[in-house]
Image (spheres, rainbow, N blue to C red):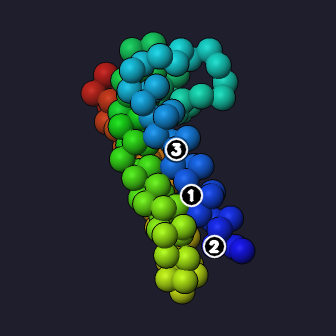
Amino acid sequence: MISTILAILYLGVGTLCLLLGRILIRKQIPKDPPFCGFRMPQSLKSDENWYEINAYGGKCMMIGSIPMLALGVFGFVSPGVFDAFLPLTVVVFAASLMMMILPTHIHAERLDKHNG
């Protein structure tokens, strides 16, 4: 039961990250909505920074969504093996999230230093 719930969660979050990443790459989300995009001091300094940092973050989100989607599919294709490696799937899921957040933060810091 828990493996099915996690597989659905992984597929759902992976799909959401993939779609949101695609929107961010296209630079379609302005700074105004408080619930979308990578909101950090560096990205809020200017519109140019906002779109640059979020486009980069969108690429990271799309890349990070791949392991999530793979885990979700794996949970349905091979539930017995998925159950055996359940703790590992949680670690991979968390690592996928970090693959989205950390590189974006590092990019924002570098952009901020470059812009002075």
Q: Residue furthest front?
A: 77
Tell me the distance, in whole angstroms, between the alpha carbons under discs 2 and 1: 10 Å
Q: Between 109 and 80, which is closer to the camera in this rendering?
A: 80
Tell me the distance, in whole angstroms, between the alpha carbons under discs 3 and 2: 18 Å
Give the residue type that dot 2 points to: Ser
Tell me the distance, in whole angstroms, between the alpha carbons under discs 3 and 1: 8 Å
Q: Residue at x 55, y 83 (%)?
A: 80
Which of the labelled discs sits on residue 84, or is there none? none
Q: Which x, y percent locates residue 71? A: 48, 64
The answer to whether marks 2 and 1 mark residues whose Cβ atoms lie closer than 8 Å is no
Q: Which x, y percent locates residue 31? A: 56, 17
Q: Is residue 107 above or below residue 32?
A: below
Q: Secondary structure at mark 2?
A: helix
Q: Secondary structure at mark 3?
A: helix
Per the image, the residue denoted by label 1 is: 10
Q: Is residue 105 visible?
A: no
Q: Is residue 17 above or below residue 10?
A: above
Q: Is residue 1 above or below residue 56?
A: below
Q: Residue at x 51, y 49 (%)?
A: 14
Per the image, the residue denoted by label 2 is: 3
Q: Residue at x 55, y 41 (%)?
A: 16
Q: Is residue 10 visible?
A: yes
Q: Residue furthest right?
A: 1
Give the residue type that dot 3 points to: Thr
Question: Closer to the N terminus: mark 3 or mark 1?
Answer: 1
Q: Between 75 and 45, which is closer to the camera in this rendering?
A: 75
Per the image, the residue denoted by label 3 is: 15
Location of the N terminus (image quadrant): bottom right
Question: Closer to the N terminus: mark 3 or mark 2?
Answer: 2
